[in-house]
Amino acid sequence: MNFLKKIIMLVPYKLKQSHFVSSFFWMTAIMVTLLFFWMLSSIIGDGFQALSWEFIFDNPSDSGRSGGIAPILISTVLILLICSLTTLPLAIATAFLIAEFIPENHFFSIIIKRSLDILASIPSIVYGLFGNIVFCKMMGLGFSILSGGLTLACMILPILILTSEQTFRSISKAHRQGSEALALSKFTTLFQVYLPCAIPALTAGFILGLGRATAETAALIFTSGYVDRMPDSVMDSGRALSIHIYDLTMNVPGGSNNAYGTALLMIIILLITNSSINWLTQRWNHNLTAQND
């Protein structure tokens, strides 16, 4: 033991520290990866047997124990579509306003950032109660897909604004000076200069927000409702995939098989969505680079 201690003492401190830090991060990454694959293998093993074309395109029956999830899929797509169409323009416009017209160290800018940080950390159940009071009751939308989509938009809006604002501020001064030299308007600068440069970071923020919205349960219970029938419009109540999984697992005895199938389908949809968005972003950057060349 004393011999080993002497050998360790001969190793430079910086080298030991660097080795320890790198080993720690490698072990953390391996543990997280193993945990992910363990969870994924469990969901695939229990949910793969439930997947079929009938499961995707049929209506649920027997409280979800049998049948499919077609109405739930349609409701989820509508909720996320409303959330995306509401969030993206507001987030980009707000971030551009903060980054372009308000100095970074200005008191008003600091207040806005602190408020956004607080809003981003608020639990989703609070957003659900807020959506129930504002959208369902005060605005008279009731338990509807529209109420659920607007509530999710409020929930992920702070994340997208913060991501977009930091991205806009990180754009080099050369781009700003070039747009000023060409006498471009602020509107033209946003679409011709800022957005092409900020697309990768905006995409990352949007994917994070969309993933959180897709897996959200608490905020939708109080706004979009539990109804598992096919919606006729966005004013109808609709059950999202996350709520369906929760209901089958907690409230429906014998519904765990379809719950695992729904969870596996949700993971597949998220993987396809994220891969498609990343592919479109790469194509955008490739076309932009080709035009500049």
Image: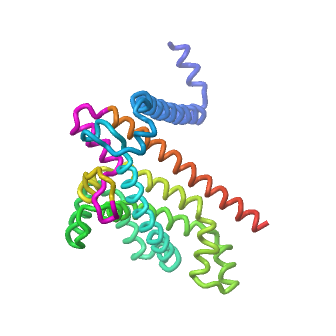
- In the rendered view, does 53 fall on the left or right side of 111? right
Q: Residue at x 64, y 73 (%)?
A: 193
- Residue, far bottom: 183
Total marks shown come to: 0
Q: Residue at x 39, y 29 (%)?
A: 46
Residue 119 in view: no
- In the rendered view, does 105 fall on the left or right side of 259? right
- Residue, far right: 293
- In the rendered view, does 200 fall on the left or right side of 138? right
Q: Is residue 234 magenta?
A: yes
Quadrant location of residue 47? top left
113 or 189, which lies in front? 189
Above or below, 7 relative to 126: above
Q: Position of residue 136 (x, y in %)?
A: 23, 66
106 or 50, which lies in front? 50
Query: Which quarter of the image is occupied by the C terminus?
Result: bottom right
168 or 69, which lies in front? 69
Quadrant location of residue 62? top left
Quadrant location of residue 203? bottom right
Q: Position of residue 129 (x, y in %)?
A: 22, 60
Q: Residue at x 40, y 62 (%)?
A: 83
Q: Coloring scheme of the render?
A: rainbow
Q: Residue at x 56, y 24 (%)?
A: 9
Tell me where the magenta segment starts and ends, as one range: 232-256
Above or below, 11 relative to 177: above
Q: Position of residue 48 (x, y in %)?
A: 44, 31
Residue 5 in view: yes
Q: Is residue 1 magenta?
A: no
